[in-house]
Image (spheres, helix red, strand yellow):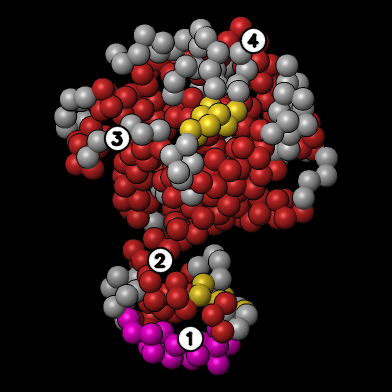
Amino acid sequence: MHQFDYRFLADSLPANLLGIAAMIYDLRGKCEIRRMYNPHVFLELQQAARIDTILYSNAIEGVVTTSERIRNLVNKESEPFTHNEQEILGYRDVLDEIYTHFEDLEISEDLLKHFHSLMLRGTSLDAGKYKQHNNWVQGRDQQGVISIRFVPVNAKETPEAVEQMIFAWREAKQESGINGLLLIACVIVDFLCIHPFRDGNGRVSRLLTSLLLLQEGFDIGKYISIDKKIDEYRNNYYQALKASSEGWYENRNTYVPFITFLLQIMYSCYKELDSKFIENTARKISKSKQIENTLMQSFVPVSKEEIAVRFPEISVSTVERVLGKLVREGKIEKIGTYRNARYRKL
């Protein structure tokens, strides 16, 4: 069986991973300050992100309904009509429990079974139970050909594997030299390699991701849906999981591809939050001031194209004029040239 041991995270890791992780921790701190002074903006974003998270995490697994029905179910304005809607309702209830009680939820086998049971209640006789028969992870290529992506831990060894994974996670949490964000990515890979349930493993893994991120101090998923981002980059998601699971049984796998993917998704979420915050606060000011505020308030360098997309009502010539003026005034600097040029405050 695979040996669960996350202590390697305290050793040398690719510098780019540590750099991205450090950047994300920095963005978290800046967003906390913004939320402190602009709670109404974040409340609006939270309401939209909750719906997106429930919608897209289920859609990844083919559990779908109409957008209108999703809103009605999420806002508790309607009862479920179909099997899919019942599962969506269950996902909503688990997510709400995580958001409300994350500080009190202790990662354990019982908690994972509870999440699974609540999510699939009334729709599956296997709800809350580990798989009784061996399963496998399959995929379909662009030609429609189905193939086996991965053969998970067999049913007989599943309880011990989950127990060992949780023990290793708890041990790693006590190590001061282990980055908590990178640890989360490793645990999710292992959970999906075990595939402890007959169905619903992907959704439980994303619920577990939400919980672990909140417990690590990252609430970005409450304002920008991480699950929606995963759906947008679904192919990359599966490729990263595949790359990080190769050689898993023999302990030859590397977690780096999935760590990289999760960090990129997190960074993308913070970048989108940055954009949405600026858009919200820029609605009542002049066009020139909107562009200037976008650059002065942004945590990351911004391109001319990104400004144009953000403010489609502002002409390209106006964007270029304001950018040139701000560069001459020494308020911003230009990084790169031509189409790759980006701008950041000084």
**Marked residue nearer the N-terminal end (2 or 3):** 3
Numbered label attached to residue 157: 4
Residue that carries the numbered disc 1 in the rendered image:
323
Query: Which element is circle 4 on?
Result: helix
* Amino acid marked by disc 2: Ile
Frontmost of labels 4 and 2 is 4
| Amino acid of disc 4 | Glu
Residue indicated by mark 3: 64
- Residue 171 to residue 53: above or below: above
Residue ID for mark 2: 278
**Is residue 159 visible in the rendered structure shown here?**
no
Residue 284, given in percent of the width and then of the height, sits at 28, 73
| Label 1 SS | helix
Task: Give the residue at x 55% y 29%.
Answer: 148
Span highlighted in magenta in the image: 314-332
Foreground: disc 3 or disc 1:
3
Quarter occupied by residue 222: top left
